[in-house]
Image (cartoon, coloured by chain):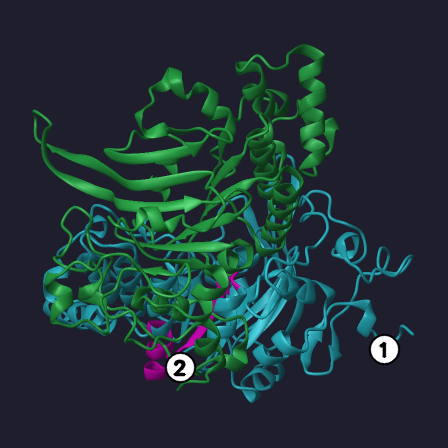
Chain colours: A green, B cyan
Amino acid sequence: METDASLTADGARPLLEVRNLHMQFPIKRGLLRRTVGFVHAVNDVSFSIRPGETLSLVGESGCGKTTTGRCIVRVYSPSSGQILYQQDERESVDLAQFDNRELRPFRREIRMIFQDPFSSLNPRLPILQIVGEPLRANRIASGSELEDRVATLLRRVGLRPEYIRRYPHAFSGGERQRIGIARALALNPRLIVADEAVSALDVSVQAQILNLLQDLQEEFKLTYLFIAHDLSVVEHISHRVAVMYVGKIVELASADELFANPLHPYTEALLSAVPKPDPRLRNKGVRIRLEGEVTDPSNPPSGCYFHPRCPYAQDRCQHEEPPVREIGADHWVACHFADELELRGFEAIGAGTDD
Amino acid sequence: MQPTPTKLDSAADAMISADESLLAVKDLKTHFFTDEGVVKAVDGVNLSLKRGKTLCVVGESGCGKSVTARSILRIVPAPGRIVSGEISFQQRNGAMIDLAQTNPKGREIRQIRGREISMIFQEPMSSLSPVHTIGSQIMEAILLHLPVTRQEARKRAVSMLELVGIPRASEQLDSYSFELSGGMRQRAMIAIALACEPQLLIADEPTTALDVTTQANILDLIRDLQQASGMSVLFITHDLGVVAEIADEVVVMYLGRDVESGPVDAIFHDPKHPYTRALLQSIPRYDSRDRDRLYSLKGTVPHPFDRPSGCPFHPRCDEFIHERCNTVDPDRYAAGTAESVRCLLYSPDED
């Protein structure tokens, strides 16, 4: 793809650069578990994350956003593509090629926060062990030093250090998510992949965790890859946003630009579907309702994957796959008609300026 | 089908039908008697729902909104039971019945469930049977409540699936729930719930597990069906965006109580209770300055075993009045456009 070099052409060297990432899962059937096809969960995805920024991946369930995140932390081995990680000033390494032993030092620097604070903490371990495990596994601390470090971490995420010997069941959902964040912070990471980190939380707790994530980002110069489906949260926390549809990035831009001036019809439809927390806006503005279902990634349509549901689709969309191209500064989109369509942003949809 | 309704005294009867109310819950208390102690999941909830309107019950997890809904249908799981309170419901024949007094396994309530009041749930995968076809689940409801033959029931099931927008309805009738996508499953569940044209639909977080685009379609569907049939909807959600989209009236709950109720516009544009205000301020909004800190409520919802004294919200409240809020349990007061607010700030006796 001609885009990957320019995707990063912005001066600052990216902390992480994903190039033409593919992830295919085999579909196995029958007694002999023969492979009868592939689910192309991540299909030629390229983007970069700059140091200190929050990049969000959004899209409906099944669009491949979680798989992309898991490829980056190398829970999965990508089928092909590069994951270039900026190791230090000069050198970058391709994480996609490494085996488990080679990955070990990088597992400290790239950490993950999970969605469900109930299933991601071992119920049989006290907080000391859950948060301290990465420190012990990497032989950084043990004994009383470990306890001190865990206590410091707990304090940093807003938990009382006296809780160190309690088990996860004694904590609420928000507190458990703080424990998960403390565990991710234990090894002073540079990049945190937060997979739906606030989706399971109530609004008041969600606000606390979002504030905590922003404070930690400032304090430790963290870089976030934030995977989410809630667009109002994404708008709040992100610097840049990538919209995914059936394994592909269809649009990538700064958060302000993407929400104000979407260029892909799918982005417009997503923005229009977000319920606005103001009853006076009801029945005002445009409503774009997508017909049908998300395309099956094991059997995608020809041409542009979005064309069966796209209200603006034309003949060309059925046959020709749109390339990712730059329209406007640092605004990338994969749509043939991106520069012709006049799509409405979040504000226009919400305020009803365009009936 | 001749239900024998429990007659309320005529004074209450007249009062309730005067404001066209279909359902009125008064001071409902549902407690769970566990080995560790009594959990007061619902501890004095009041709400009323007018015909053809949508009432949203909103609150954080553990505030008792689902238990309130289940209390209305008398499907509270053991060891929970209704301790006191009144649930007056006007039946189709005009008779009033106090659902709180019915036997949860008795004939009366079984003739109301599915026929007069239906419910849809958050997770359609676990509330639909995986071993019965969608069609047989719809027909079960129809055959149970309506005097029709199997052929007629099947026809009606097809037309229900068409009504909720499931493509190729007559084929899909014979498919199983796992063969459908999340949005289609939720549509199938709505078809089952509406098969007998209930007067009241209780929707417990029906869109929480769905994508935004699917959620928008399901909300549209519920609204359209409501307009066509004139049913009332009791909608339970924690998502204030959804409330703003769909509600006529709103009840905000905290720790098993209604803390504020009123018309949707009043709740969003003139919230009275400090908790309602805090909730509204915690949602990330487009018009707020990007990446500013969000307002966040201090602390967490207290454990149900140690309920704070006085106003249950006082430990987290910014407008806490020392020596008053932690001792006095606030009553429901009228304040401006809100119907009722449980907060001492609006008590006529306070200065």
- Tag 2: amino acid: Asn
- The image shows residue A161, relative to residue B122, as above or below, that is above
Magenta highlight on residue A33: no
The residues tagged by marks 2 and 1 sit, at their Cα atoms, a distance apart of: 41 Å
Tell me if A297 is positioned left or right of A3 in this view.
left
- Nearest to the observer: residue A19 or residue A260: A19
Where is the N terminus of chain B found, in terms of image quarters? Answer: bottom left
Residue B156 place in picture, x, y as percent: 17, 72
Q: Is residue B2 visible?
A: no
Residue B348 is marked as 1
Residue range corresponding to the magenta coloring: B221-239
Element type at mark 1: loop
- The image shows residue B195, relative to residue B41, as above or below, that is below
- Nearest to the observer: residue B227 or residue A87: A87
Tally of numbered discs = 2
- The chain under label 2 reads B
Residue A339 place in picture, x, y as percent: 30, 72
Q: Which residue does the image show at 55% across and 58% down from the upper left?
A: A236
Judged by depth in the image, the label closer to the viewer, 2 or 1, is 1
Residue A349 place in picture, x, y as percent: 43, 77
The quadrant in which residue A289 appears is: bottom left
Q: Earlier in the sequence, mark 2 or mark 1?
A: 2
- The chain under label 1 reads B
Q: Is residue B345 visible?
A: yes
Which residue matches tag 2? B93
- The image shows residue A151, relative to residue A326, as above or below, that is above
Tell me if A48 is positioned left or right of A54 in this view.
left
Element type at mark 2: loop
- Tag 1: amino acid: Pro
- For the residue carrying disc 1, how many other residues have a C-alpha within 10 Å: few (<14), some (14-19), or many (20+)? few
